[in-house]
């Protein structure tokens, strides 16, 4: 059950971060509201994952790595931002580090 909450937290955080770009410095109302609501929801759901037994290091690591990867891909696909092979490699390293954290915690 904590993974359900973590996935929700990731989705909310990615939505909020993408909306932050679209808010144009909080000058556009709807994206600005989505930013605030999204971040509040992300932290609320992250806290629920932790309350249901997920380790902090794993939860935060997965949340951060997934957020980084998803925001980078969304930026490249929909916002006209660049995504070089070096950046893709860096994202892979971050994800690999989180996987190592998760596997190390299982013992």
Image: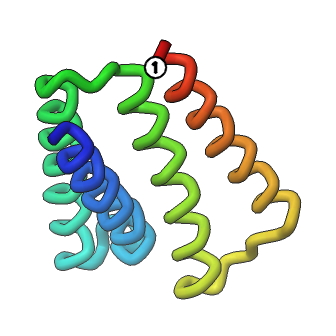
28 vs 11, nearest the viewer: 11
Q: From this viewpoint, which residue is outermost toward the front? A: 107
Secondary element at tag 1 = loop
Figure check: 7 above or below 94: below
Mark 1 closeness class: few <14, some 14–19, many ≥20 residues within 10 Å: few
Q: Is residue 12 above or below residue 46?
A: below
Question: What residue is rendered at 57% in x and 34% in y?
Answer: 98
Q: Please, is residue 28 above or below residue 42 in the view?
A: below
What residue lies at 52% left-to-right and 75% top-to-bottom? 74
| Residue in the image at 34% along x and 70% along y | 19
The residue singled out by tag 1 in the image is: 106
Q: Give the x, y percent position of residue 61.
A: 48, 33
**Residue 102 place in picture, x, y as percent:** 50, 28
Q: Quadrant of residue 6?
A: top left
Query: Which residue in the rendered view is the most extreme toward the right?
Result: 86
Q: Residue furthest top?
A: 107
x%, y% of residue 105? 48, 17
x then y, percent, for residue 69: 57, 58
Task: Give the quarter of the image for residue 99.
Answer: top right
Q: Classify the position of the N terminus by image quarter.
A: top left
Q: Which residue is drawn at 16% across and 47% down?
A: 40
On the rendered structure, is 69 left or right of 34? right
């Amino acid at each position: 059950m904590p993974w359900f909450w973590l996935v929700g937290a990731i989705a909310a955080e990615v939505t909020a971060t993408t909306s932050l770009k679209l808010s144009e410095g909080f000058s556009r109302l709807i994206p600005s509201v989505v930013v605030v609501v999204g971040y509040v929801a992300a932290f609320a759901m992250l806290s629920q994952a932790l309350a249901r037994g997920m380790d902090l290091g794993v939860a935060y690591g997965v949340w951060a790595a997934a957020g980084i990867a998803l925001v980078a891909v969304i930026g490249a696909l929909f916002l006209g931002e660049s995504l070089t092979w070096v950046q893709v490699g860096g994202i892979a390293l971050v994800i690999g580090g989180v996987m190592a954290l998760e596997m190390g915690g299982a013992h």
